[in-house]
Image (cartoon, rainbow, N blue to C red):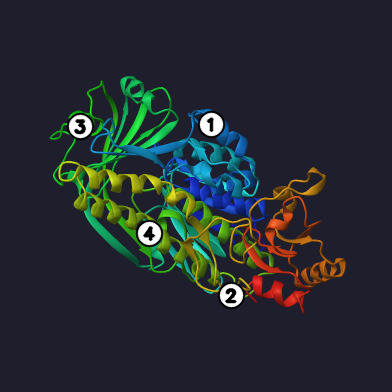
């Protein structure tokens, strides 16, 4: 075990419990900002069960920020030219009724990176490699967190190690639980959660079938398939490609008493697809369909993120993407406090911004999908009224990409966002307009400059045909407050006018803190509010 020698008595700045993709992402982000991090992770090896594959363009931006985007793209077993879209089918996958669905590329113009598709274990391997490259990160593999204590000064995490079968502890000013839906950190911090049980037992099947690959070549470029079975009360049968060599995963409801031995999984798959084909099962597992949401994401110096804060069935690929956004939000705020320029209310804003986003994701997307499908199959059937069914099916098809185009996490109404009303959520309309509380969309800068690179790791003031004196006032105020601030100056031309603002203050997580067209009375007030002072 490696422990840092620190004059302040702590072992590191932040302890991260859970070294899956979300925990690794947090550790990398913190380390790149100059913090020391120690990560406690139970598994010495990654688990080769495919999940968390449908990664958004925003997650691509995180990979770009963590300097792993090229490695992520190289690790994908499905080449980009194949496509990354889905489809919905009624009854059986090879039946008469289906439409395109979940085309991530529809919102690509609003982000600085492309969407990715690869199994979570491949992304985890890339992130483990990146973490090993950063001197600020110490990984404790084969270790299990068992308890936590906190005081006004810091946190102590107790853990056991497979290496010596002994008890150990680490101390830090802060700790973050990224240790999954059964989070030990959440329990140790006495953070309660709301649970929406759906009383459904779900099977996860992983299998090889080259014959199924051949059967589905009639749907070119498709990677995910949702089968709407009238017998399943709106719950999905969900099939997805792991690669193009005939490896698949499949989620579906099964009777509550189902075991590996008493259920014919091959026949179940054949009925869902609408044809028989050879199957070589690699994994058969089960999970309970439920949606959970922590009542707070923080208790004192202990925070939670990812599945420790929120978990849900694999509807729409929101889980890992939401977890990545949690840690990008939290990392710069912890950094600001540790480096001394963050205000007293900054850490409170993590819960205020992120928890409503998942609340909206859960109600406006995940639960709504289940309810919409249930209502549809109750109201329409080709056997009862073919004309009414086909009309309703066509209406569904026309809105088949709404869950992609309308999924827009934002922080409107956040206590550290200026000039916005409402409350944070996950639903919105993608625009280039620079809107307070929203993610910054890309535009081209003159001189072949890359805006993403120009933003830097701290705050950034974008001035388009701005007054040099205003820029200087922001720079001086940032220096006085100790806030890292870069500037980007350009003209309102060649598409940059689409921002509809002369001045745009961008946070370290690339969300917009403030916009303006005229010189503000006091830039220091704007910066102070943005860092929770």
Mark 4 or mark 1: whose residue is earlier in sequence: 1
Q: Quadrant of residue 490?
A: bottom right
Alpha-carbon neighbours of circle 4 within 10 Å: few (<14), some, or many (≥20)?
many
Q: Secondary structure at mark 4?
A: helix
Q: Is residue 423 visible?
A: yes
Mark 1 or mark 2: whose residue is earlier in sequence: 1
Residue at image mark 1: 80
Q: How many marks?
A: 4
- Asked if residue 264 lies left or right of residue 415, the reply is left
Which residue lies at the image location 71% right of the left edge and 64% below the top edge? Answer: 501
The residue lying toward the viewer, choosing from 186 and 387, is 387
* Distance (Cα) linking label 4 and label 1: 29 Å
Mark 4 or mark 2: whose residue is earlier in sequence: 2
Q: Is residue 123 above or below residue 168?
A: above
Give the farthest residue toward the front. 387
Mark 3 or mark 2: whose residue is earlier in sequence: 3
Residue at image mark 4: 362
Alpha-carbon neighbours of circle 2 within 10 Å: few (<14), some, or many (≥20)?
some
Q: Secondary structure at mark 1?
A: helix
* Distance (Cα) linking label 3 and label 2: 55 Å
The residue lying toward the viewer, choosing from 453 and 421, is 421
Q: Viewer-nearest of labels 4 and 3?
A: 3
- Asked if residue 484 lies left or right of residue 313, the reply is right
Residue 116 point in image, percent of width and height: 52, 39
Locate the C terminus and report the quarter of the image it occupies: bottom right
Residue at image mark 2: 345
Residue at image mark 3: 271
Q: Viewer-nearest of labels 1 and 2?
A: 1
Q: Viewer-nearest of labels 4 and 2?
A: 4
């Amino acid at each position: 075990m490696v422990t840092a020698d620190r004059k302040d008595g702590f072992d590191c700045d932040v302890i991260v419990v859970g070294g899956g993709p979300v925990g690794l992402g947090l550790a990398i982000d913190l380390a790149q900002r100059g913090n020391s991090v120690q990560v406690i992770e139970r598994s010495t090896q990654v688990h080769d069960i495919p999940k968390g594959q449908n990664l958004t363009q925003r997650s691509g931006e995180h990979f770009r920020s963590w300097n792993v985007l090229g490695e992520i793209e190289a690790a994908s077993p499905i080449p980009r030219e194949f496509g990354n879209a889905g489809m919905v089918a009624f009854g059986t996958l090879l039946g008469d009724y289906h439409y395109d669905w979940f085309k991530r590329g529809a919102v690509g113009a609003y982000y600085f990176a492309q969407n990715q598709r690869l199994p979570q274990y491949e992304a985890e391997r890339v992130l483990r490699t990146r973490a090993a490259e950063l001197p600020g990160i110490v990984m404790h593999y084969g270790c299990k967190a068992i308890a936590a204590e906190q005081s006004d000064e810091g946190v102590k995490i107790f853990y056991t190690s497979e290496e010596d079968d002994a008890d150990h502890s680490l101390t830090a000013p802060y700790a973050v639980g990224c240790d999954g839906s059964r989070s030990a950190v959440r329990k140790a911090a006495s953070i309660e959660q709301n649970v929406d049980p759906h009383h459904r037992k779900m099977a996860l099947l992983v299998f090889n079938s080259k014959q199924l690959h051949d059967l589905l070549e009639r749907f070119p470029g498709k990677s995910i398939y949702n089968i709407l079975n009238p017998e399943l009360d709106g719950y999905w049968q969900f099939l997805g490609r792991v690669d193009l060599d005939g490896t698949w995963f499949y989620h579906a409801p099964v009777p509550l008493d189902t075991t590996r031995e008493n259920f014919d999984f091959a026949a179940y798959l054949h009925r869902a697809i609408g044809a028989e084909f050879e199957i070589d099962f690699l994994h058969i597992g089960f999970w309970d369909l439920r949606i959970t949401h922590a009542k707070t994401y923080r208790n004192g110096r202990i925070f939670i993120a990812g599945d420790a804060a929120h978990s849900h069935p694999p509807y729409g690929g929101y889980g890992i993407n939401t977890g990545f956004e949690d840690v990008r939000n939290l990392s710069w705020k912890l950094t600001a406090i540790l480096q001394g320029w963050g205000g007293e209310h900054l850490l409170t804003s993590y819960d205020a911004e992120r928890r409503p986003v998942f609340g909206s994701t859960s109600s406006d997307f995940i639960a709504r999908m289940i309810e919409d499908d249930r209502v549809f199959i109750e109201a329409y059937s080709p056997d009862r009224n073919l004309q009414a069914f086909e009309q309703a099916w066509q209406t569904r098809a026309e809105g088949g990409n709404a869950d992609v185009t309308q999924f827009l996490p934002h922080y409107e109404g956040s206590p550290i966002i200026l000039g916005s009303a409402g409350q944070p959520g996950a639903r919105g309309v993608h625009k280039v307009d620079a809107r307070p509380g929203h993610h910054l969309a890309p535009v081209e800068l003159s001189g072949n400059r890359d805006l993403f690179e120009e933003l830097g790791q701290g705050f950034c003031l974008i001035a388009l045909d701005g007054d040099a004196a205003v820029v200087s006032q922001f720079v001086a105020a940032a220096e006085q407050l100790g806030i890292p601030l870069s500037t980007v100056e350009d003209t309102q031309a060649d598409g940059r006018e689409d921002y509809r603002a002369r001045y745009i203050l961008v946070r370290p997580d690339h969300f917009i803190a403030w916009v303006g067209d005229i010189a503000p009375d006091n830039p220091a007030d704007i910066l102070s509010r943005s860092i929770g002072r």
